[in-house]
Image (spheres, helix red, strand yellow):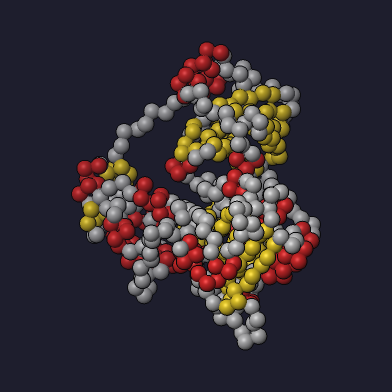
Amino acid sequence: MLNVPSQSFPAPRSQQRVAAGGRSKVPLKQGRSLMDWIRLTKSGKDLTGLKGRLIEVTEEELKKHNKKDDCFVYNVSPYMEYHPGGEDELMRAAGSDGTELFDQVHRWVNYESMLKECLVGRMAVKPAVLKDYREEEKKVLNGMLPKSQVTDTLAKEGPNYPSYDWFQTDSLVTIAIYTKQKDINLDSIIVDRQDDSFRAETIIKDCLYLIHIGLSREVQEDFSVRVIESVGKIEIVLKKKENTSWNFLGHPLENHHSLIPRKDTGLYYRKCQLISKEDVTHDTRLFCLMLPPSTHLQVPIGQHVYLKLSITGTEIVKPYTPVSGSLFSEFKEPVLPNNKYVYFLIKIYPTGLFTPELDRLQIGDFVSMSSPEGTFKISEFQELEDLFLLAAGTGFTPMVKILNYALTGIPTLRKVKLMFFNKTEDDIIWRSQLEKLAFKDKRLDVEFVLSAPTSEWNGKQGHISPALLSEFLKRNLDKSRVLVCICGPVPFTEQGIR
């Protein structure tokens, strides 16, 4: 038996799976589904108990309301019976600031939309004094701060604090970001431009450095992004609409020039257009979304995003792991460029709330997509020799990009083994592609395991077990460098990790 630490996908702390240790769902009463809750919020019933008034809630007042039938600033008492985690989970935050607890469990949920009819009022807090960069920006000449200002800024923010600058020609504006890190690549930078708003998020270790500016003049939709990895420099080149000189780059917007822990940042969404939708199995579809022309975003391997739809007036959000358009290019011609198109393999649940609505979208409709999240690092693959992948159902989706990368980008790789668990043969995603890829590349072995096969099935049967794993997890060499990845329903991943 191979005794190596396992890497699970998504990671245990990821929002895409329930936290290990186990936040469990509770059985809800009849008529207490999410759709039932949405209907109640549209009924006109007073869910705040304040008859339409909004009040300012002090910290002292908040502490008084810590019983099941008396919760502020959102009065979640009416929501208790609809909450999948049960009353006890909500009561952990009663009478206190529940933001941190909420973020730990499901910060991707749009509570503002779901609970807007329960809003009691705002907390009475002292307004924060924000640094005004407007005056500093006006003093900038062609993007260069006077030497005294540069010195003061670095002394205040520290020598490793990221910085930015800007330069211009008659037709171009170049924004340069100095990350002071050497592990920066194109996955590390996300750029969004809407109207005159320019937003650039740079992922630096566990933090996010944000440039957020209202541009002083108009630019064209398309732009380019270049990363100089050896010095950790990012260059974003914008094209001017008019060939005139800019006196200043623009005015700062919310959180401009800030370095924020990623766990404390909100989710930023952009509208993506549905380009294609095709059947993969009887209940799984391959969706292709096109990013806006003025967006640069590449989802790193092992990370996920959130898709958001408005359903009967309420915003519903679900996490998904993007995949490649196919396991190799022969299956999809022409291949669409990865920097503008994002693919998802999604199982449609007929009785669900989100996926049927997603499936009803027409080509040309829009879906909101968040920036990527996740903790997996590409460095996990360095000098890797044996890669073992365990997937169940749509838990196969994170493995798609891993397979693509492993077989093309890891020169030390000797063997990749995939054990793919499903209920029936009809449930196997991309079976023909996997079999063809294994035939083409002898480093890949694929085993299908079915829990409810027909009598004609000649392959492996059952569920994940030590007996199956002991045979599967065998090194190519005694001391080879190994990585084990696992993804599927929570019971499957927990059993596999044991």
The percent position of residue 282, horizontal first and vertical second, equals: 63, 75
Please name whichever residue, 162 or 399, is drawn nearer the observer in this view of the structure: 399
Q: Position of residue 376 (x, y in %)?
A: 55, 49
The quadrant of the rendering that contains the C terminus is bottom left
Q: Residue at x 40, y 51 (%)?
A: 104
Horizontal and vertical percent position of residue 477: 64, 57
Residue 282 appears anywhere in the view: yes
Q: Is residue 262 above or below residue 487?
A: above
Q: Residue furthest top?
A: 148
- Judge by depth and name the residue closer to the eye, 492 or 299: 492
Rendered residue at 36%/71% (across/down): 27
Q: Is residue 52 left or right of residue 316?
A: left
Q: Is residue 399 above or below residue 371?
A: below
Query: Residue 81 vs residue 441: left or right?
Result: left
The residue located at (38%, 66%) in the rendering is 25
The total number of labels drawn is 0
**Image point 66% across, 67% down: which residue?**
446
Residue 113 shows in this picture: no
In screen coordinates, is 264 left or right of 420?
Answer: left
The outermost residue toward the bottom is 455
Where residue 37 appears, as percent x and y from the top left, is: 39, 65
